[in-house]
Image (cartoon, rainbow, N blue to C red):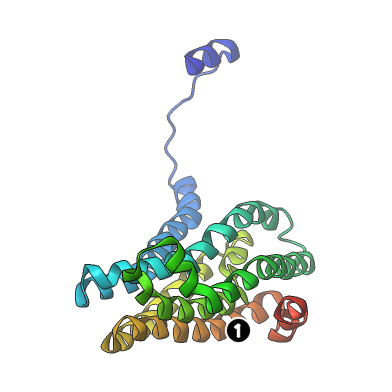
Amino acid sequence: IQLPLFLILVKWLPKFTFSIRYLQEIFKISGYIFITTLLIVLTGNLDNLFIGKIMGAKILGIYSLAFMFTILLSSQITSMMDRVLFPFYSRVQNDIALVKRYYLNSLLYYAIVLYPVMLLMLFFCSPILDFFFDSKWSTAAPVIRILAFVVPVQLFTHKSTLVYRSLGKPRLETFIYLLTLLFVMLPAVYLGSFHGVEGISLGIFAAACINLFVSLYFLNRELSITFKDILVKLKAPLI
């Protein structure tokens, strides 16, 4: 009903016009974003694929529970702010100093919320599991402890690729995700799979540490952000 009324009131009808130039301009951005989305899905499910294929549904269930209490919890919290920050970065993309300042501030806010939560999971995951679940899920505790270390490492450079996209560099974002998937995440999960679910968890942690240095390189190149800048900003939550 709304669409016909709108067309009647404004007295305008859309016309079909095909333009290769406009299509190329759209694909220049959306094409890379689409590829990046696929890479994110592949990277995020690589561990589940290996565990489900090699170790079976029971171990996959244990790992999924540990993942839910750590990495998934972190992503759910940070995604709310990420949706707000992306259009903001886009509006101020010509002021790199301002982008840098707000990016570092966002890391601080993430750390204030998530570092205490991960510390809680690290030391009290067993009582939490006993309280909410049956004793058969207690085997998830070691995996939770390992993944609880992954989140703080990831937060050091959380969503740095989102900044590159907002600066009009989606190709760089795609390149970074492809690089980390093929040369970091895939080898780490594959090698970890030889040592059970805890081995894969350790592989995820190793991949997060390597990705930290990759992200720091591009942050320094694009925004002049150093590891020292991040440590200074996160000094209070880390202490």
Give the x, y percent position of residue 31. Answer: 43, 56
Task: Give me the residue at 62% from left, 68% from top.
Answer: 114
The answer to whether residue 188 is seen in the rendering is: yes
Please determine whether, in this image, residue 156 is positioned above or below residue 164.
Answer: below
Amino acid on which disc 1 is placed: Tyr
Give the x, y percent position of residue 126. Answer: 46, 74
Please determine whether, in this image, residue 215 is positioned above or below residue 5.
Answer: below
Task: Give me the residue at 57% from left, 80% from top.
Answer: 153
Give the x, y percent position of residue 56. Answer: 20, 72
Report which quarter residue 219 is drawn in: bottom right
Residue on which the image places disc 1: 217
Give the x, y percent position of residue 110. Answer: 66, 66
Report which quarter residue 95 is drawn in: bottom right
Left or right: 134, with 119 as reference point = left
The answer to whether residue 46 is seen in the rendering is: no
Task: Give me the residue at 35% from left, 69% from top.
Answer: 135
Q: Nearer the viewer, residue 23 or 32?
A: 32
